[in-house]
Amino acid sequence: MLSYYEVLGVPPEAKPADVRAAFHAAALKYHPDKEASRSTQGADSMQPVSFEQIKAAYEVLQDSHLRDIHDKELALHTYRQHMNFQDELSLEEMESMECDACPHFS
């Protein structure tokens, strides 16, 4: 699972100005109208990044409510990987549990 932070190359504690700057840099690099984006897309990472992913990441990380939801989904994903759950759990169930790897749920 590629997080929106990874798409834009910013840390989870990045400020809105940092997110905006990373978006502009990525948009210039990966914009479909740019010839260079076609030849370098995905060359500097294991997973290719599309311009649509960059736009989606920016829209979510700029909105505090959507960013909070994204952070909780990432924490849930991390928690499930950490605990090797086979069954689905809801956010409410996760919030009632404690995990050192998941600061959003403690």
Image: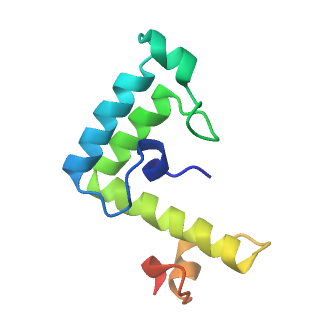
Drawn side of residue 5 relative to residue 48, left or right: left
Q: In this rendering, would 76 be left or right of 103? A: right
Q: Which of 39 and 11 is in front in this view?
A: 39
- Snapshot quadrant of residue 104: bottom left
Instruction: Return the residue found at the far left.
Output: 17
Q: In which quarter of the image is the C terminus?
A: bottom left
Task: Using the image, determine if residue 17 lies above or below residue 72.
Answer: above
Q: In this view, does 80 lie to the left or right of 65?
A: right
The residue shown at (54%, 73%) is 91
Q: Is residue 89 visible?
A: no
In the image, residue 64 lies at what x, y percent? 27, 57
Q: Which of 67 and 5 is in front in this view?
A: 5
**Quadrant of the image occupied by residue 83:** bottom right
Give percent across and percent down for residue 80. 67, 72
| Residue 55 position within the rendered picture, expressed as x and y whole percent measured from the top left | 39, 33
Decide: is 85 above or below 22: below
- Residue 56 seen in the figure: yes
Q: Which residue lies at the image location 51% right of the left edge and 79% below the top edge?
A: 102
Residue at coordinates 44% horizontally, 58% vertically from top-left? 70
Q: In this view, does 47 lie to the left or right of 7?
A: right
**Vertical relation: 26 (above or below) 78:** above
What residue is drawn where x is 47% and y is 67%? 72
Q: Which residue lies furthest to the front in this view?
A: 44
